[in-house]
Image: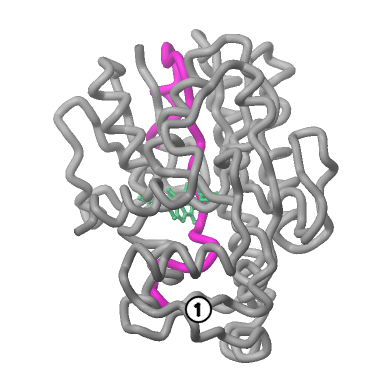
């Protein structure tokens, strides 16, 4: 079975592509720069170039493919260690880099003689906005902040595919605990250098998922023909930031008593600091209702595992 992953060179896509290839899927990863990315894919994964915007050079691959997985999009915090500020221009790019691939996917599917049966569409748990008290399930309405609006537009970019009779599962992903980069690296670094602690009040929720469970959940949704609509891809046990700090300190055997005041983070990073200072208590209700079980439902074993993996 042929599966195409847009944005498959990223943190999630790399793991997913390897998993699918090992399971016997003919896996095609689209990348804007396959040569410079130099991801170490096994021979079962084919890397193809695209422009990140149109169907040029890859649209014909959709003909006869069984599934498309859309993970493409400019990294929300940037790929460097210090997060990129959300200027008006950058915000526009963050949105466009998600909506244009969505539109290209629709065009490619529409043009295909033999259409795929399923699309897995990426989104984020930021869809719900943030709250200290509310519990968010897939039935909760979207929030009103920048990330929430981005997620709404992102999800909408492939909505018309449903009118073609194609099953669409939306993955509202929480922070993936991948120490090779991204949010976890930034959050853990202060602990490694002995200055870790809570961020702001420490009360904010931190929804998270083990990278292995993220890949298992995507594969589950890909293969379960009942799975359609939005799914929260997060562990059933989100934690508050203060708990994150205590557990990270314990695992790394470092102090966790150096809080970072919210105003300092906001002054240094601007609006993007809200990703660390605010959060949401989301639960994977629809995923669990469909029978998915997590290998890592609890944070401490999950963090221990991923930090060992990277040791
Ligand atoms: N990791 C998380 O914790 C998390 C949480 C919630 C949601 N998500 C979302 O899930 C998706 C995959 O996550 P990830 O962590 O694997 O992301 P990632 O590591 O940033 O990878 C995303 C991929 O998208 C491609 N891309 C980047 N900018 C693009 C652009 N302007 N146009 C088209 N493609 C572009 C890149 O591939 P090439 O450079 O090879 O083209 C990149 O490898 C992302 O959209 C992300 O926002 C991730």
Residue nearer the viewer, 181 or 184: 184
Splitting the image into 4 quarters, where does residue 169 fall? top right
- The image shows residue 259, relative to residue 170, as above or below, that is below
Rendering coords of residue 97 (x, y %): 56, 54
Residue 244 locus on image (x, y percent): 51, 63
> Would you say 197 lies left or right of 285 here?
left
Left or right? Give the position of 230 relative to 28.
right
Pick the residue in front: 99 or 86: 86
Viewer-nearest residue: 102 or 55: 102
Residue 290: image quadrant is top right
| Element marked by disc 1 | loop
33 versus 272 height, above or below: above
Q: How many marks?
A: 1
Residue 207 visible in the current orientation: yes
Q: Residue at x 30, y 37 (%)?
A: 48
Judging by the rendered image, the residue that carries numbered circle 1 is 197
Task: Find the magenta span and give its range.
Answer: 57-81
């Amino acid at each position: 079975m042929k599966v195409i992953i847009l944005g498959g060179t990223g943190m999630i896509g790399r793991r997913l592509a390897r998993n699918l290839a090992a399971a016997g899927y003919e896996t095609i990863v689209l990348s804007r720069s396959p040569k410079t990315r130099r991801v170490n894919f096994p021979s079962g994964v084919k890397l193809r170039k695209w422009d990140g915007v149109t169907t040029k050079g890859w649209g014909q691959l959709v003909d006869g493919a069984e599934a498309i997985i859309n993970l493409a999009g400019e990294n929300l915090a940037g790929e460097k260690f210090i997060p990129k500020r959300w200027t008006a221009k950058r915000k526009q790019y963050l949105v466009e880099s998600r909506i244009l691939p969505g539109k290209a996917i629709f065009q490619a599917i529409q043009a295909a003689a033999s259409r795929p049966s399923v699309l897995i569409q990426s989104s984020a748990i930021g869809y719900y906005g943030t709250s200290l008290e509310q519990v968010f399930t897939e039935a909760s309405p979207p929030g009103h902040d920048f990330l929430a609006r981005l997620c709404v537009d992102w999800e909408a970019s492939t909505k018309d595919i449903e009118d073609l009779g194609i099953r669409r599962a939306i993955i509202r992903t929480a922070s993936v605990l991948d120490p090779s980069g991204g949010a976890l690296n930034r959050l853990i670094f202060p602990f490694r250098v002995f200055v870790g602690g809570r961020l702001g009040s420490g009360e904010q929720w931190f929804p998270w998922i083990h990278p292995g469970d993220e890949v298992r959940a995507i594969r589950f949704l890909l293969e379960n023909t009942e799975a359609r609509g939005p799914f929260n891809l997060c562990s059933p046990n989100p934690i508050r930031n203060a708990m994150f700090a205590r557990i990270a300190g314990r695992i790394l055997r470092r102090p966790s008593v150096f809080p970072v005041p919210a105003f300092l983070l906001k002054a240094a990073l601007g609006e993007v600091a809200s990703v660390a200072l605010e959060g949401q208590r989301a639960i994977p209700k629809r995923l669990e209702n469909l029978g998915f079980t997590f290998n890592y439902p609890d944070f401490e074993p999950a963090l221990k595992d991923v930090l060992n993996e990277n040791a």
